[in-house]
Image: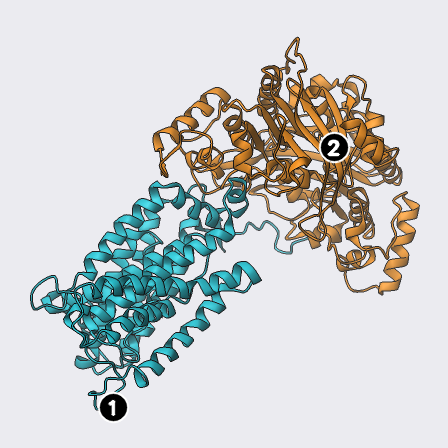
Chain colours: A orange, B cyan
Amino acid sequence: MLERAAEQGVPAPLLQAVGISKRFGDLLANDAIDLDLWPAEIHALLGENGAGKSTLVKIIYGLIQPSAGELRWMGRPVVLDGPAQARALGVGMVFQHFSLFENLTVAENVVLGLPPTESFAAVSARLAELSRAYGLPLDPKREVWRLSVGERQRIEIVRALMQNPKLLILDEPTAVLTPQEADRLFETLERLKGEGRAILYISHKLEEVKRLCDTATILRLGRKVATCDPRRETAASLARMMVGGEIGEVKSGAGRSAAGARLIVRDLSLEPDDPHGVRLDRVSLEVRGGEILGVAGVAGNGQDELFAALSGERLVDADAIHIDHRAVGNLSVNDRRRLGAAFVPEERLGHATAPRMSLSDNALLTGHAVTDMVRHGFINRAATLASVDRTTKTFDVRKSKRDPEAVSLSGGNLQKFVVGREILREPGILVVSQPTWGVDAGAAATVRQALLDLAARGAAVLVISQDLDELEEIADRIAVMFEGRMSAPLAAAQADRETIGLLMGGSSLKPREAAHAGA
Amino acid sequence: MLVLERRGESSTAIAIASPLLAIALTLATIAVLFALLGKNPLQALAVYFLDPLTDSYALQEMAVKATPLVLIGVGLSFCYLANVWNIGAEGQFLIGALSGGWLAVATHGTGAGPWVLPAMLVLGAVGGALYALIPAICKVRFGASEILVSLMLVYVADLLLDYLVRGPWRDPQGYNFPTTAEFDPVALLPAMIEGSRLHYGALIAVVVVIVATVVLGRTIRGFEIRLVGAASKAARFSGFDADRLVVTTFVISGVLAGLAGVIEIAGPVGHLQPAFSPGYGFTAIIVAFLGRLHPVGILFAALFLALTFIGGEGAQITLKVPLDLTKVFQGLLLFYVLACDSLVLYRIRLVMPQRRTADGIA
C-alpha cells in the first residue's frame, strides 16, 4: 500500500473509512467496515442485497451519519453533515434511482442540482462540452421524458461530473442498461480513471466487476469479508465470499416436452394509463405448456402495460389474449384465475401484497375467487391460515410468527411467499414479473427452481425480467420488448448476449415480422 | 433530536392506548382552558364528566344522544376504511329525517295504522342513501372531490329542512313557530322503559354494531373495504373495483345516517324543526376516529361524546360557561386523536447527533 501511495504521489488514500458502523434499531447495517479508496482506481463494492452496501455509500456521501467510526479525506478526519458537504469535498454520486424532472429539459435538470453561481447559458455550454469529452452524448435542450433510461443515466453522470469530483460513486449503474450501453459506460469510466479520479463501483454482477475494477471490497451481512484484486479471483470464488457458501445450482427439469400453446397473445395493442407510459404495439407471443418464455428488455419499455393486460387489471379486446383456447382479453383478473391462470407482479409491497395486512389476508388477496377461503361470503380463517402454513413449509418462508404483516418479512422471504401462494394452486398459466428482483441468492434460487418445476409439470410460464442471467438460466425461449413492441422469440440456447442486447436497444427489430413470427 | 420511526408491526396495545391518551390530553388542555376562564379546573371537569354519570336521567340521556352517533359513526367507518371521505353525514342525517318525517306529516290526523313507523324507517334509510349517492356518483363519473360535494350538500339539506318547516309543513296550530305538528303515536318509536326517553332506536344501534363487526371482520365484502383502503393497487390486483366500492360505502353510510335521522325525530324529538340536530353528523366523524374505525370502539366513543353534550349542558347551567365549549372540546379531541394515531404506525425515538469535530469539515 505504501509503495502504491508513493507511486501516486499521495501520502494517504483519497478517502478512508475507518471502523464505520451504523445501527438502525436492532439491525447492525454496517459493522466496523474499513475501506480505502485511491486515486486513479476503480474500486468495486460487492455484496448481496442487504449486505450493507447502500448504507456505507450513503455514509460516504453524507446522507446518513455513522454510529461509530470515522471518514478521512486525504488523511484528515471529516464529518459530513450532508451531501452538500460531500460534494464540496469532491465526492459525486450517481444513484440507481434517478432524480430527474420528466417535464424539464436536460440542461434545466442539471442546473437545478448546481449552486446558483453560473448562468444558465454557461451551464448548458459546459454540459454539452463535458458530454462530448466523455462520450456521453446528450442534447441539453431535450425534455427528459423523451429520453431512454441509458440517456437519463448519462444526465446523472454528467451532473456529477459538472462538479469536477475527485471521487465518483456509482450505484448499480448497469442494472438498467443493455450490454452495449454498459460497454460504453465502461469506456467512460476508464477515461475518468485515467484522469486520476477514484471511482467506487457498487454492483453484484461478478463478471463486470472482474472486467472493470482494480480492487474489490466484499460485504456480507454488514461486515467486510475481504478486499481483493477481482481479476485474480474467479466468479465462483467471488460469489462464495458474497454469499458465504455455495449457491444451490438450479436444475432444469429433464425431458420437458413442449405441448400445445396455452397462453396466446395476438396483436395486443394498449394505450398507456399515464402520459409517460408506453403504448403496447401489436404484441404477439405464445407460451406452450411445459416451457418458460422469457421477456427481456430494459425497464419501461412496456413490461408493466403487458403485465396489466395479461393479468386483467386492464381489459383489452377479447381475442387479443387466449388462455387454453378461450378468449379472455375482456375477462376480469378473477375470471382468468378461475381458468387456471396466476400472476405475480413486480412490486411485492403494495401490488402483490397489502403491506400492513397479515399474510393470511394476503393469501385471501389472490385466493378469494378460486379457493375454499370464502364460503357464502364469509371468510374461512382456518383455510387462509392453512394456506399460509403450506406456503411457509413448501417454500421455507422465514418469519417471526405464524401470521405476521407482509411488511415485516424480508424481500426474499416475501417473494417466496407471493410466488409460493400462486404455485401451490398449481396454475396452468403463470405470468411473473421480475421474480427475483432485489432478492438474496438463496431465495432467488428457490424461486427459479419453483418456476422450472412448475413448467416441468406442464404449465406455461411467462417470465418478464430485466436480468439476462436469470433468463438464460431458466427460459427456453427469450423475446425482447422495446418501446412497446415484442421481438420474435429466440431459442435460449442460441440467443447470444449481443443479439439480445441489440434487440434491447431497439436495433434490427422489425415489428411486423416479429409479430408474425411470434404468433 | 426527535425522530419518527416506522414500526415493523402495528402495535395492538398502542392501538387501544392511543385514543385513551388522546382523551387524557384533551382533558388536560380543557383543564387549562377552565383555569384561564377563572374556574376551578378539577371542579369543572367533575361537572362535565362525573356528575352526568351519577344521575340516572343523565345516563339514559347519554344513551339517547349516543344512538345517532353510533349509527352514523359506524356508517362513516365503512367509508373511511375504504379511503372514501364522506364528510356530509349531517346532510344525509337531515334528509333521512325529512324523508321519514314527510310520511308522519302526511298521515298526521288520518288515523293511519301501525305501518307508519316501519315505513318511516325505510323511507329515512332510502332518503339518506339517495342523498349519499350524489357525491358518490359525482366522484366516480366526473372525478369531483367527494369531500367538497358531500360537505356542501349538508347546507342544501339544512336549508331544505328550514324551508319545509317554515313553509308547507308548518303546524297550522303552532302559533307560527317553525315546527311541524307533534307526530301521532303510530309515527313514534316506543320507549324501552315506560316513562323514560330511552327508545328502541338504541337497540337498533346495538344491532348495527354487531352486524357491522361481523361484516367488516368476517366477510369478503369487509375484506374488500379494508383492502381498497389499505392498498388500492393490490385491491385492483385482487379483482375489486374501487369505483363500485365508493358507491357501496356511500350508500351504506347514507342508509345508516338516514336511519339515524328518522330515529331521532321519531324518538326523542317527536316532530321536525330547524336545527333539531346538534351536529350529530359532524360529531360522528370524531366518534368514528376515536373508535379507531371499529364498530365496538365506535360504540364506546359515541357514549363518551354523548357525555360531552350532556356535560356541556350541565356546565352551562352550573358554571355559566358557553355551550360552545362543547364544540371546542370535540375539536381538541379530534386533533389529539389524529395526532396519537401516528403513534400506532410510528414510534418516537430520541437521537443524539454524534459530533467528533466541532467544525464539521476538519
Q: Secondary structure at mark 1?
A: loop
| Residue at the spot of label 1 | B176
Query: Dot 1, crowdedness within 10 Å: few (<14), some or many (≥20)?
Result: few
Q: Is residue A17 left or right of B244 when viewed as pictured? A: right
Q: Residue at coordinates 80% horizontally, 51% vertically from top-left? A: A146
Q: Quadrant of residue B174?
A: bottom left
Q: Is residue A179 visible?
A: no
Query: Dot 2, crowdedness within 10 Å: few (<14), some or many (≥20)?
Result: many
Q: Which mark is residue A222?
A: none
Q: Position of residue B290 (x, y in %)?
A: 33, 58
Q: Is residue A278 left or right of A134 when viewed as pictured? A: left
Q: Nearer the viewer, residue B351 or B112?
A: B112
Q: Quadrant of residue A44?
A: top right
Q: Nearer the viewer, residue A363 or A85?
A: A363
Check the image and name the residue furthest to the bottom. Answer: B175
Q: Position of residue A6 (x, y in %)?
A: 84, 33
Q: Is residue B116 left or right of B217 when viewed as pictured? A: left
Q: Residue at coordinates 30% horizontally, 44% vertically from top-left? A: B214
| Residue at the spot of label 2 | A284
Give, as a three-letter code, the residue at label 2: Ser
Question: Is residue B75 shown above or below A314?
Answer: below
For the C terminus of chain A, the image quarter is top right
Give the Cα separation between the discs numbered 1 and 2.
78 Å
Give, as a three-letter code, the residue at label 1: Asn
For the N terminus of chain A, the image quarter is top right
Q: Nearer the viewer, residue A350 or B338?
A: A350
Question: Is residue A194 shown above or below B187?
Answer: above
Chain identity of mark 1: B
Q: Is residue B235 left or right of B99 when viewed as pictured? A: right
Q: Position of residue A105 (x, y in %)?
A: 81, 57
Chain identity of mark 2: A
Q: Is residue B131 visible?
A: yes
